[in-house]
Structure formats: structure tokens, C-alpha cells
Amino acid sequence: MTIVTADWLITNPQKRPLRFCGARIQDKEIVEIGGNEELKAKYPDDEHIDGTGKIMLPGFVNTHTHMYGVLAHGIPLSDPPEDFWAFLKDYWWPKVEDSLDKEMIAAATKWACAEMLQSGTTTFYDILEAPNTLPGGLQAQREEVISAGIRGILSFEATERSGTRKGQLGIEENMSFHRETQNDELISAMMCLHTTFTCSEEFISEAFSIADQNNLGLHVHCNEGTYEGLWCEENLGKRPLEIYEGLGVTNSNFIASQCVHLSEKEIEIIKNTGIKVTHMPLANCEVGGGIAPIPELIEAGVTVGLGSDGYINDFYEVMRGAFLIHKARLQDPGVMPASTVLDMATSSGAMALGLEQVGKLEPGYSADLQLIDGQFPTPLTSENIFEQIILWRNAKHVSDVMVAGKWKVSGNKILSIDLDQARDALHKQARRLWAV
């Protein structure tokens, strides 16, 4: 039994922060919340982790990432893409995805896990896009995720852009991984497709049917740039989400990432069918995709999570982007309050991925938590703490991280990964990729 105390405890961003409170942990889960002195007096024989001067909050849930993406950070580009379609066709597909092998993705996975843990992320959903690693690409990732000790949902992005056979191999990869991880403590699977312009309607229906039969979520990239909507209208006479709705695949197990360019009808479809949405504010900017109508979706009652997209994995930076960018787009400083953004990064993120007992620090929930520096230039109050965290904190302020009751970062040091070895391996594999 362990008691972790702190100056402030955020159990759930939708609730008022607690002053001088802590959590009692047994094995993998939180069993009690209470005042620091009360817990210590009540359970004098428990191990005590003293978080004086710190804030305890739930571990972050990164609802959309591509861990292999770290290999492309800084990749030389002689002819930068001019728009999103050119980004995919002339750069990302040939120079990154189609050039990846298992050694590359293993090195990238290890490093990405380190970046996430060091910035307070305890759960993630990853999409592997590497057709030449089939079969077995997800297994290469799995080994590194187990070693890191982080909670992960892994999937392979099935697509017919490389041919029908590769598409089928992608579906089979997801189902094989699902069978292999049935008894894993922290790792699970999901069905994943690319887009309406790389997957036929028959292929989409097949993947959904298989996912539905196995009680798996179905993830798609949706309207990341203007290209997909225009292509669908020209070739199929409907918008992407109209196509999915017509195929009968839209429900509460359907996860649509990006959702940057939505029509009013598509927003209604999302609202009415229970589709979950994941938002990548920084990556959408980096590829010139645009700014998603997230405040409008939240106002409509849609569950929205946050993701890094494999771009900047420090989730404090991702939250800061979500907090600021929509204020500028709508010219309204009142939209996207800090509590909403922090909720997207924790509880709502877990809901978007269909995870239970994750994303909150309450009895019965998994002991996935982080301790961060609570010393700010100005006083912390229950009214300003969420905003202070989002605006003035980042990975360097995260001192301790626990996943399912086990410390993975302690005293600002990651315990499960040798960073020097991981960096050397990543450099080696990045040079191989860049030389293709």
C-alpha cells in the first residue's frame, strides 16, 4: 500500500481541485482519496511518497499518435510540399511510410515512449503506417511498449493505396494483434483504416464488420485536409462522414481523428451517431491542414480527446496549442477554458478510446498519475490552477509518473529506458531512413 500526497490534487478536471490531499494506492488502483494528514494517520504503515510543493494529476491520454513519426523529425527536404495532398503523395508516403522497417519502428517506439512518459503521458493510442513491416510490425512495437511499461493501444492503418493484398494484410495484422494481446495487462488492439480516398466502400464495410464482431473500436483519419472532402464529393457525391453513415459504420465505437474540415451535416452526423473525435492542434498546423471546429463539437456534446500525431509529444505543449489556437480562430478568449482542455487530455481522452477506469484519480480507477512542480511565480488557487498548469508547465516540470501502480519516472529520471542507448539507436535508424 502506498500513499502519495501533494499540495494540490486534481482528481478530475471537471471537479474542484483539492488542497493538501493525496491518494492511497493498492496494487494497480486507487482505493482512497483524502487529506494528507488524515491518510498518513489512518495508515501509518503504508509507504509514503511526499509530494510537498507538487501538484498530483491524472496521467495524460494521448488519443492519437504515430510513434514512428520521430524518425522524420528534421528529415532533409529539398522540395517542401505545397499542400496537404502533396505532403502525403510526394513526401510522407514515399519517403517515410514506405521506407520503414521493423528495426526503425522499434527504435522509434522506444524513444516515443520515453518522450511520453517524461511529459506525464501514461496512455496512448498509436497508428502504425508501414506497409513493408507486414506481418509483425505491431509485434515489434509491442515488445518496446512492454519494456517501457506504458499503457498502449496499438493498431495498423489498413489501406488499399498499396494494393488490395496489402489492405487485407493490414486488417489481418490488427486481428492477429488483438488475439495476441487478450491477456496483456497494459496493451490492447484497435481496428484502423486510413481514409475514404484510399479505402473502397467494400473494404471499409469489411473492416467495420470484423471490428464489430470482436468488440473493437474502428479508427479513421477524417477530413484532415480539404482534399478528402473534395475527392469524395467529386467521386462519390457525398462528404466523407456521409459515406460512413451510409455504410452503417458510424456509432460510439467509431473514432474519427483530425476532423478539420467538416460540413454542418457532418457535425450533425458526429453528434447524432455518437462518433468520438480526436484533435491534433499542433500537427494540423505543421502540415497546413487547418484548425478543427473543436469548440463547436464540444458544444454539441461530442466526446473529444487530444493527440500529438507523432509530432510534438510533450503533452503540455499539445494542451497549450488547443487552449490558444481556438481563441484566435474564433476571436473569443472565453472559448476552450483550461478545465475543458485538461479534461480532453485525461478523462475525455480515455472515453474517446473506450477505456474504463482510466483518466481520473478516483477510487476504482487505475493508478496512472503524475507529480509536477507546483511552485509558480504567482499564487495557485483553485480558480487559476488549470490555467497555470496549461500555460506555464511542460515536460521539464514532471518529476514522477506512475502507470498502473508502478513508478516509471522518479525524481525526474525515467526508470524503464536508457535514454542514451535509445537516442543512439534512434539516430542510427533515422540516418538509414533519411538515406533512402
Image (spheres, helix red, strand yellow):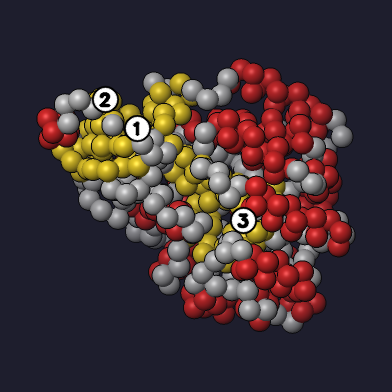
Whether residue 11 is visible to the viewer of this picture, yes or no, is: no
Q: Residue at x 29, y 48 (%)?
A: 362
Q: Going by the image, does 197 lie left or right of 188?
A: right
Q: In the image, what residue occupies the spot 38% across and 60% down? A: 335
- Which callout, 2 or 3, points to the residue nearer the camera? 2
Mark 2 or mark 1, which is nearer the start of the sequence? Answer: 2
> In the image, 234: left or right of 386?
right
Identify residue for label 2.
47
Q: Quadrant of the N terminus?
A: top left
| Visible residue check, residue 170 | yes
Residue that extends furthest to the front in the rendered view of this protein:
183
Q: Residues within 10 Å of mark 3 (few under 14, many from 20)?
A: many
Q: Which residue is at a point 86% across and 62% down the rendered structure image?
A: 164
For numbered disc 3, what is the local secondary structure?
loop
Give whichever of discs 1 and 3 has the lower sequence position.
3
- Local SS, label 2: strand
Q: Residue 371 versus residue 228: which sits nearer the camera?
A: 371
Q: Amino acid at mark 2?
A: Glu
